[in-house]
Image (cartoon, rainbow, N blue to C red):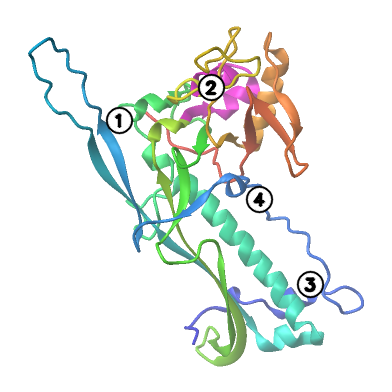
Amino acid sequence: MAGPDTLGMFPTMFDVTSTLDPQGNTAPVVELLQQKNPILMDMPWTEGNTPLGHQINQRTGIPELTWTSWYQGTPPTKSTYAKVMEACAIGEQRSEIDKRAADFNGNSASFRLKEMLGAIEGVNQGLSTALFYGDSSKNPQQFNGLTPRYSDLSAGNGGNIIDAGGKTGAALTSIWFIGWGSSGAYGIFPKGQKGGMQREDLGTFDAFDAKGNRFRAVGDLLQLNCGLAVEDWRYIVRIANVDVDALKSGTGAADLLGLMMDALHLPPEVGRSRTGQDAYGAGANGAAPILMMPNPVFYCTRKIAAILDRQAQIKSGFTLKSGNDVFGRPVTECRGVPIRSCDALLETEDQVS
């Protein structure tokens, strides 16, 4: 049974009639509020090893080589490890519709579907935002996203935060380099549960208007039980403090392409390059190497993506490759690594110091 609520949470008669065409049928809806968040397409998922999330054993120490000689022994050595618990969080989206509105003009199934598609988009946007900005210290119901993990230049992973020079008071954003895969970052869901978005048809039930009066409603419940695991922090790089206004004006603008080159060289494992590789798998002929990982990707805002294209046109000896992915979608690459626009990223970030 649904609890007390306001009418603002339910589709009104205006909402219903607004979605009807002149013949009284449910018309297609142009989704103006839909966002572009390809991070959900790139991110791999795996079942956690605990009912609450996923425990990772990170190597913190490597055995040291012992120099020895004849008639001298060698002491045993071993690696040292630290246990890291990556927690999952529960996200829900509930759609409730007055049964009379759903039955209006015989379009119950169609109208409910349109409401649920809006709810699904809300889930997608909420998850994408949480992957970058979720912070369990501020909201205990959330899992930790990337920003609180890479927010201090003096921290142990501070070497993987590149300062683009923007200061407090400016329109600041970040460019993220993420190595998706078992050795980098991946999504998790609790052990023994289903991955992905789960939908429950709530059927017909009593709901309440703002005065506490009952009415019959139909509804759907969408649920995600998920989290983010970072197996090795070295495979993620944040280019922080990017001043968007400076980039647009050209005054004091950061060299984004140069900073992205720096990001490509920070992760520990490198290999294939666009012009070949040497006997050790490193970039040959002076070419910058790219990662030997399942799926390395750059993420930035739409404005930054446009500025990157402009900077590439005027930067001597540098071009961004454009083409299509396996689904026929256009993609721009920097030294073989895709650059994707992501609307979940903000241009109102705090300065990282």
Would you identify the image quadrant in which residue 267 lies? top left
Residue that badge 2 annotates: 271
Mark 1: amino acid: Ala
Residue that badge 1 annotates: 155
Among numbered discs 2 and 3, the one appearing first in the sequence: 3
- Find residue 3 and name its label: none
Frontmost of labels 1 and 3 is: 1
Among numbered discs 1 and 3, the one appearing first in the sequence: 3
Among numbered discs 2 and 4, the one appearing first in the sequence: 4
Q: The magenta stretch spans which residues?
A: 238-263
Would you identify the image quadrant in which residue 76 lies? top left
x, y percent for residue 79 = 23, 33
Q: Element under label 1?
A: loop
Q: CA distance from mark 2 to mark 3?
A: 55 Å
Among numbered discs 4 and 3, the one appearing first in the sequence: 3
Mark 4: amino acid: Gln
Q: Residue at x 74, y 80 (%)?
A: 109
The reply to whether callout 1 and callout 3 are in contact (CB within 8 Å) is no
Q: CA distance from mark 2 to mark 4?
A: 34 Å
x, y percent for residue 57 = 30, 43
In the image, farthest residue toward the front: 71
Residue that badge 3 annotates: 18
Residue that badge 4 annotates: 35
